[in-house]
Image (cartoon, grey):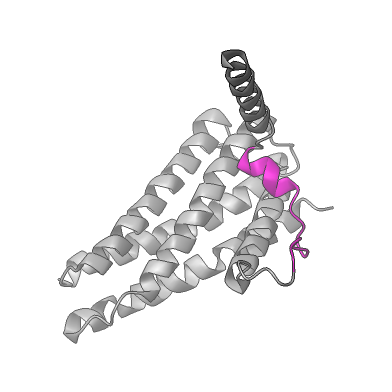
Amino acid sequence: MRFLVFTLLVSLCVIAVNANDNVLPEEELLDNVSDSVYIGSESDDSVVLGDFEERTILSKFYKGLKLALRTLKGVNCSIKEALYIQLAAKSFVADCENCAVETSKKLTAVIKSCNDVINTVNDIVNYNDNICNNGNYNDGTDADKPTPSSCSKKLRSKFNTLNKQSKNTLKLVKKLPDIPGEAGVCVKASLDALTEAFTLFPTNVIECSKLTSN
């Protein structure tokens, strides 16, 4: 009896180890995701349209990013887009302070998410300058140079993080109630600019891939 129990436990351990060996990193999983096909049962109630759309967009972003980062021209283009949303985040955070906006739990969450975006873009710039040695990029001489694989891998990881953070920020902004009074008027322009920049970010990065598609 004890031998039977021991044999069963060993079998379960082997199954668990094999299962872990078959788990792919997120980037490898995204490589296998179709841009237009979601494999699943039509009668599966757990499949939500919003989830389907988000997965499709995520897949397109990842594949477009991967193409964009093949050359230094694409890297430069993608980093410009990252800096653009960083500027929008910085402007909004600064306006919240300068306009004396009354803090709330929801506003604090948006500001924190903006700061996460700002920090991630700083990491991207640091990688580009110090790890990829691309700080002195020259469009005339460097544009078509291939991006070193170690560099593109690190940048790809950070850009995927940035994309998730920007999407999270937009979700938090949607939950944000109207800011009353003069403070609301004061901060409206930067909030609108942030919403537009963050919404366009994935599409703009995908557009950068066209620079390397020829």
Q: Which residues are magenta?
A: 25-41
Residue at position x 77%, y 57% in the image:
34
Residue at far front of view? 1
Q: Main secondary structure of the magenta part?
A: loop
- Foreground residue among 127 and 39: 39
Residue at position x 74%, y 37% in the image:
145
Vertical position of residue 110 compared to residue 150: above or below: below
Residue 167 position within the rendered picture, expressed as x and y whole percent measured from the top left: 48, 62
Q: From the viewer's perspective, tell me whether residue 179 is left or right of residue 137.
A: left
Residue 53 position within the rendered picture, expressed as x and y whole percent measured from the top left: 64, 69
Q: Does 33 appear in magenta?
A: yes
Residue at far top of view? 3
Q: From the viewer's perspective, tell me whether residue 87 is left or right of residue 100.
A: right
Residue at position x 73%, y 46% in the image:
31
Q: From the viewer's perspective, tell me whether residue 192 is left or right of residue 207.
A: left
Vertical position of residue 6 compared to residue 28: above or below: above
